[in-house]
Image: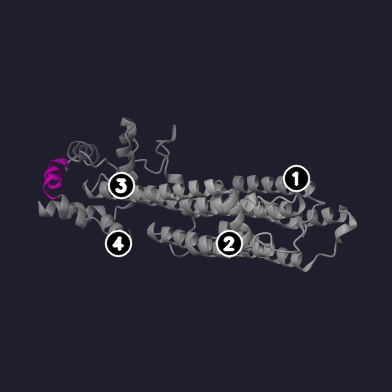
Amino acid sequence: MTLAETLTATATLAAPHTHGFLSPTGVEIAFLLVGLVTFGAALVTVTTKQLVHAALWLVVTLGGLAVEYLLLTAEFIAWVQVLIYVGSVVVLLLFGLMLTKAPIGRSPDADSGNRWAALAVAVAAAAALVWVVVDAFRATWMDLDGPAAGSTAVTGASLFQNWVLPFEALSVLLLAALVGAIVLSRKTKSELSSPPVNSRAATGSSPSVPDSRNHTFRRNGRSQGNDPTERNTPTTQTTQNTTPTEQKGTR
Amino acid sequence: MHLVYPAVLAALLFCTGIYGVLARRNAILVLMSVELMLNAVNLNLVAFDVWLSRTAEEKLHSGQALTLFTIAIAAAEIGIGLAIVLAVYRGRGTSDIDKLRDTAEGHESDGPDGSGGPDNTGGSDSTGGSSPGGSDSDGTEPPAAEKAEATA
């Protein structure tokens, strides 16, 4: 962040005198402070060892971005950000963390072994991007006065005058995503309810023959005893197994 | 407002997301990092739309419309992504990306399922899928098998 600030300061020094460099406006100061909070929360999100805390810091990041949208006079985008990201996406992520039985406390293996390579890549990309962006837009100002550029009336008018066809196509995409999510979860449910204990990833169409072959490969002496139980009592095994019951409870 | 402020913030958020995608091990944390990258793109779109709507007098508001589309697509993406992660978790018993090495070339021996390595010679997904699940949920499966034998 210090690199970015120094670069920003040099860019401001090199800028022409039309907008009053080194005397930032109140909007710029507010943007900078909220941006620091947002960036810090994003850093904590990707570095914390506690998985649930990562989701909660993501709330701070997305909320800070909503405030940045408000400062950029894009009101409708800001409220959509609050409703969809903070309201639904983070809740979905928390549900996902709970359904995959994420550990509540500190998990020491949250980061993989290549985190130093990842850090090098990220720092290099950040340096290159910040340098290019500052060099390109060092003398560019936005005019935030006057009527809001992103109020609900302006955004709605442009959306339903110029962007009607992409809007409708997007509704079809949302429908496809809805159907896809349902199909993904139901397919695994039918897969899990039909095969017996040990072969979860087998296809549910013909459970008897390949499963018995797997059992002869995996556990050597018990295949003779397991085969009749698989064919006779599939329903009791599905009720005894833990994963279908928790799956029915969650979905 | 200087245009550099939102542009630099968006670049830094994007690189934070890159670090998260590359360094995280849990699949849901990778999805969170993807959300960070998408939000960086959204901030760029909004900032340049506000700049262009005043400077170039364009009334199309393409940046804000694309931001709304990006938000909707991100919501769809997180739904599908979480469904896939949950399906993988039910099948394998883990959501750890480093352990999902069934399609890796030459990694059958040093994978976490070293015991299931010889079973993978057939190349079918069923044996490779069942062995990590069996290794992870050892606490649940033997009682179920014993109960099944007891009922028989």
* Label 3 to label 4: alpha-carbon separation: 16 Å
Chain letter behind tag 3: A
Asked whether B126 or B45 is in front, the reply is B45
* Label 3 to label 2: alpha-carbon separation: 33 Å
In the image, the segment drawn in magenta is: A223-233
| Mark 2 neighbour density, 10 Å: few (under 14) some (14–19) many (20 or more) | many
In primary-sequence order, the first of circles 3 and 2 is 2
Magenta span: chief secondary structure: helix
> SS class of the residue under badge 4?
helix
B27 to the left or right of A43:
left
Looking at the rendered image, the quarter that the C terminus of chain A falls into is: bottom left
Furthest-right residue in this view: A17
Amino acid carrying label 1: it is Val
Chain letter behind tag 1: A
| Mark 3 neighbour density, 10 Å: few (under 14) some (14–19) many (20 or more) | few
Numbered mark located on residue A249 in the image: 4
> SS class of the residue under badge 2?
helix
Q: Are marks 1 and 4 in contact (CB under 8 Å)?
A: no
Query: Which residue has dot 3 on it?
Result: A187
Amino acid carrying label 2: it is Leu
In primary-sequence order, the first of circles 2 and 1 is 2
In primary-sequence order, the first of circles 2 and 4 is 2
> SS class of the residue under badge 3?
helix
* Label 2 to label 4: alpha-carbon separation: 30 Å
Amino acid carrying label 4: it is Gly
Q: Position of residue B7 (x, y in %)?
A: 71, 53
Query: Which residue has dot 2 on it?
Result: A62
In primary-sequence order, the first of circles 1 and 4 is 1
Looking at the rendered image, the quarter that the N terminus of chain A falls into is: bottom right
Query: Which residue has dot 1 on it?
Result: A132
